Amino acid sequence: MRRLALAAALLVCGCGVKEDVSLLVFARGAQLTKGTNAFGSKLDGKVEIVFDLGKYGNESVRVEAIQLGIYRDTTQLVPGAKFELPAGTAFPVDLAPGQRGSFGYTITKESITADEAAALCAAPVKITGTAKQTGKPEIAIASAPFAVAGCP
């Protein structure tokens, strides 16, 4: 259903032919929790990044890297938050037409400042970033807006 909606949107926007459909990268399941530890406040979370090269893509693609951060509009809220991949998972990622894959990132920062905590709790926030493809423009990534758990 999602692909059908994407194809319809591309036709309406003037792309016109199936061969113009390229790599789709999106974030889903974003969650953040503000907690406490011996140092004060900390941050934990997760997000899944999905790569989908439509079956009408005309060539394979290589995703070299993903850069992610926690934002409200264009303001980064927690510089230095770690976005880590599971052990054994690494870039680059090669995708052939019709192939789909995903990486689940864990998000941590062992000590966040009072200002960072206040910014996180002034919801909503988004996980945003870019996916870098070999020889092609970067693709913007953004989760749906969400509230951080553990906030008053």
Image (spheres, rainbow, N blue to C red):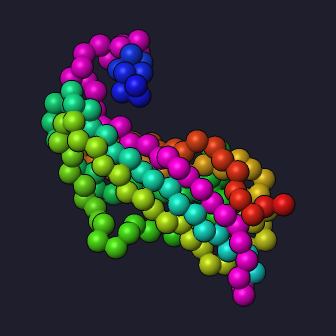
- Residue 22 location (% of width, % of height): 28, 32
Check the image and name the residue furthest to the bottom. 38
Query: Does 53 appear above or below 110?
Result: above
Q: Kindly tell me whether residue 142 is visible in this rendering.
A: yes
Q: From the viewer's perspective, is 108 left or right of 73?
A: left
Query: To which quarter of the image does residue 149 belong?
Result: bottom right
Query: Does 71 appear above or below 113?
Result: above
Q: Which residues are magenta?
A: 11-39
Check the image and name the residue furthest to the front. 1
- Which residue is depicted at the point 73% across and 77% down? 36
The reply to whether the magenta stretch includes residue 12 is yes
- Which residue is depicted at the point 66% across and 47% down? 146
The reply to whether the magenta stretch includes residue 62 is no
Query: Does 115 appear above or below 27?
Result: below
Q: From the viewer's perspective, is 7 left or right of 30?
A: left
Q: Kindly tell me whether residue 80 is visible in this rendering.
A: no
Query: To which quarter of the image does residue 116 belong?
Result: bottom right
Q: How many labels sit on residues?
A: 0
- Residue 148 location (% of width, % of height): 70, 56
Q: Nearer the viewer, residue 28 or 15?
A: 28
Query: To which quarter of the image does residue 16 belong?
Result: top left
Check the image and name the residue furthest to the right. 152
- Which residue is depicted at the point 56% across and 71% down? 108
Image quarter of the N terminus: top left
- Residue 98 location (% of width, % of height): 22, 36
Q: From the viewer's perspective, is 13 left or right of 100?
A: right
Q: Nearer the viewer, residue 18 or 13?
A: 18
- Which residue is depicted at the point 79% across and 71% down? 114
Image quarter of the C terminus: bottom right
